[in-house]
Amino acid sequence: MDIKNGELWFVTGSQHLYGDETLKQVAAHSKNIADELNRATEIPVSVIHQPTVTTPDEIYKVCEEANRNKNCVGIIAWMHTFSPAKMWIGGLKILKKPLLHFHTQFNRDIPWSEIDMDFMNLNQSAHGDREFGFIMTRMRLNRKVVVGHWKDLQVRSQIGTWSRAALGWHDWQGAKFVRFGDNMRSVAVTEGDKVEAEIKFGYSVNTHGIGDLVKFINDVPENQINQLCAEYQDKYKLDDSLRKGNSRYASLRDAAKIECGLEHFLQAGSFKGFTDTFEDLHGLVQLPGIAAQRLMNKGYGFGAEGDWKTSALVRAMKVMAVGLPGGNSFMEDYTYHFAPENEMVLGSHMLEICESIAENTPSCEIHPLGIGGKADPVRLVFNVAGGPALNASIIDMGNRFRLLLNQVHAVSPPHDLPKLPVARVLWRPYPDMKIGCAAWILAGGAHHTCYSQNLTVEHLQDFAEMAGIECISIEKNSHLNQIKNELRWNEIYYR
Ligand code: MN
């Protein structure tokens, strides 16, 4: 994915009150800022300067064009002078793309010895942007407000963060996710309203019988299976038994065949992610293990046990993080270490952890799986490096979706885990184990999450605002009472 193809349109508002000379300066300054933001390495998308808008018609037109443009992921709006905001109502009413209100000023410093009324009339964003802010607040529109000089690195990185959220949001619009089989029987949190999700999030989730996938798997040509087995051997520490000529080589071929067939299916249907369930594997030799791990690494969303909400979230977070060091993976809070002063969560899954978060070269192994009743699945086994990370989960509250975040700190495993045949990660939740887990559980957070090494709370808060959904964040400075109150108050807000 070439994210530089994504465009942020830099739109400057003004009016005709000040004469042509001022408007010329406004246009030149705004071009200067847009070009500089376009070159900024903190902003991964292209920033495209647009002509200054000075009338309701011009404003409406640029919003209409932004809606229609396939590459435009959002608009940056700035009022260099004063742009009476009733002019913006028509355009803002129809604007479908996310909006960032950039509260900046062309001049960084006040030119103390030279400042006169001409300067004041040109550099009016301190009040021009307040007029613009009012109309958006009056219209109850979600937007990001970034404050500061346009050369400020923190300002640029905030714009970059928001633009990544906008990329993820853009990617969801019209996206297709496929479910093989339904939800794991009787599980609650992985269920949800797919109709509401399509209305709210713009992506569709539809099912295919596992037999449809089996057809693709059976059609995989021999040479592709050979090639993929060779790739496994080159790329991973391949278990001896799985090597060509050895006892389990046929199982490796089965796994490779599943991966190829699954990828062909996703490509043929232009799907951006999938779910499966171990309760519905008719015609599959193994539960897809290495296939899910590697397809996630290629950017596909994945959710186990029919968890389409997490599959879609994994996909969005992968798009948001394109080009950043570190990875994003489907994850599950699996088991705990309750040693005093050293409490930790061990995150893992039966098989399906994305190799993008692996610390070292994964080993490719085969082991029995206690559930599913199928042949032993091939999987990648690895540890995950220590460092800052977060878990994100979307749940369906019945009348709304809630995005739940928890900052965590990953810890390198203090011991070998010689008998644990799955990829795993250890972390300490913030603010601490007791408060972090209690808050997560009170907020109804799922056991499935997307674990991210490279996205921050701000990325996901920006994303939630674009989606117009609730966002609860459990962070370093969170208190349990504050979270409890937030949950109670949000019940009223969203009623
Ligand atoms: Mn699970």
Image (tube, rainbow, N blue to C red):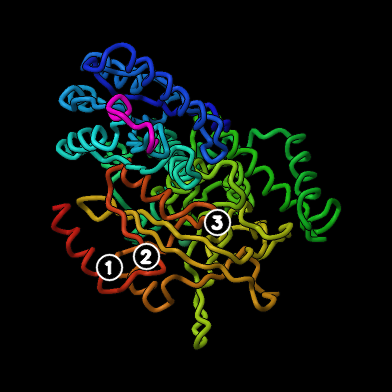
**Which region shows up in magenta?**
111-120
Q: Amino acid at mark 2?
A: Ile
Q: Is residue 113 magenta?
A: yes
The residue labelled by disc 2 is: 474
Q: Amino acid at mark 1?
A: Ile
Q: CA distance from mark 3 to mark 1?
A: 24 Å
Please state the horizontal and vertical placement of residue 84, each as a whole percent of the image: 18, 25
- Along the line of sight, the residue nearer the viewer: 113 or 373: 113
Q: What is the chief secondary structure element of the magenta stretch? A: loop
**Residue 177 visible here:** no
Residue farthest toward the bottom in the current orientation of the protein: 340
Please say if the residues under marks 3 and 2 sit with CB atoms less than 8 Å apart.
no
User: Which residue appears at 81% of the width and 59% of the height?
Assistant: 247
Q: Quadrant of residue 323?
A: top right
Q: Residues within 10 Å of mark 2 (few under 14, many from 20)?
A: many
Mark count: 3
Q: Is 323 rendered above or below residue 373?
A: above
For residue 156, which numbered disc appears in the image? none
Q: Earlier in the sequence, mark 2 or mark 1?
A: 2
**Element under disc 2:** strand
Q: Is residue 212 magenta?
A: no
Residue under numbered circle 1: 483
Q: Is residue 138 above or below residue 62?
A: below
Secondary structure found at label 1: helix
Q: Nearer the viewer, residue 3 or 62?
A: 62
What is the x, y in percent for residue 465? Answer: 31, 45
Secondary structure category for the residue under label 3: loop
Q: Which mark is residue 453?
A: 3
The mark that comes first in sequence, 3 or 1, is 3
Q: Pointer 1: residues within 10 angstroms few (<14), some, or many (20+)?
A: many
